[in-house]
Amino acid sequence: MYRYDNGVQKGDTMRVPEFSQNLSWLKGDLYLWTGLPNMGKSEIVKYLMLVKSMVDGWKWAIFTPEHAPE
């Protein structure tokens, strides 16, 4: 009922205008980024996390098995 009465909750800005138009960070949510291999998913997500950490002091926990040491 909350979403029906009040609409979708808006999160914090991504701090990158090209992304902030369509996506926002909502604390407590799980974000899953998918796509083809070697298309830059990890790089763009790490960039967005870095910007949010530098400006707003956010901290992160990530799991990226492809970057594990061998």
Image (spheres, grey):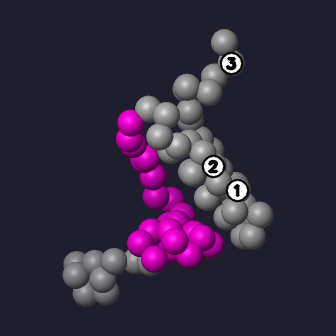
Give coordinates of residue 11: x percent, y percent. 49, 74
For image coordinates 56% across by 75% down, the residue present is 17
Quarter of the image for residue 57 reads bottom right
Rate crowding at label 2 as few (under 14), some (14 to 19) or many (20 or more) other CA atoms within 10 Å. Answer: few
For marks 1 and 3, give the CA distance. 22 Å
Residue labelled with disc 3: 69
In the image, residue 62 sits, relative to residue 21, either above or below, namely above
- Name the N-terminal-most of marks 1 and 3: 1
Marking on residue 50:
1
Q: Which residues are magenta?
A: 11-36
Residues at marks 2 and 1 touching, judged by CB atoms closer than 8 Å = yes
Q: Looking at numbered disc 2 in the image, what kind of residue is underneath it? A: Lys
Quarter of the image for residue 13 reads bottom right
In the image, residue 10 sits, relative to residue 32, either above or below, namely below
In the image, residue 34 sits, relative to residue 1, either above or below, namely above
Q: Looking at numbered disc 3 in the image, what kind of residue is underneath it? A: Pro
For image coordinates 60% across by 70% down, the residue present is 16
Rate crowding at label 1 as few (under 14), some (14 to 19) or many (20 or more) other CA atoms within 10 Å. Answer: some
Marking on residue 46:
2
For image coordinates 62% across by 72% down, the residue present is 15
Residues at marks 2 and 3 touching, judged by CB atoms closer than 8 Å = no
Q: Residue furthest front?
A: 39
For marks 2 and 3, give the CA distance. 18 Å
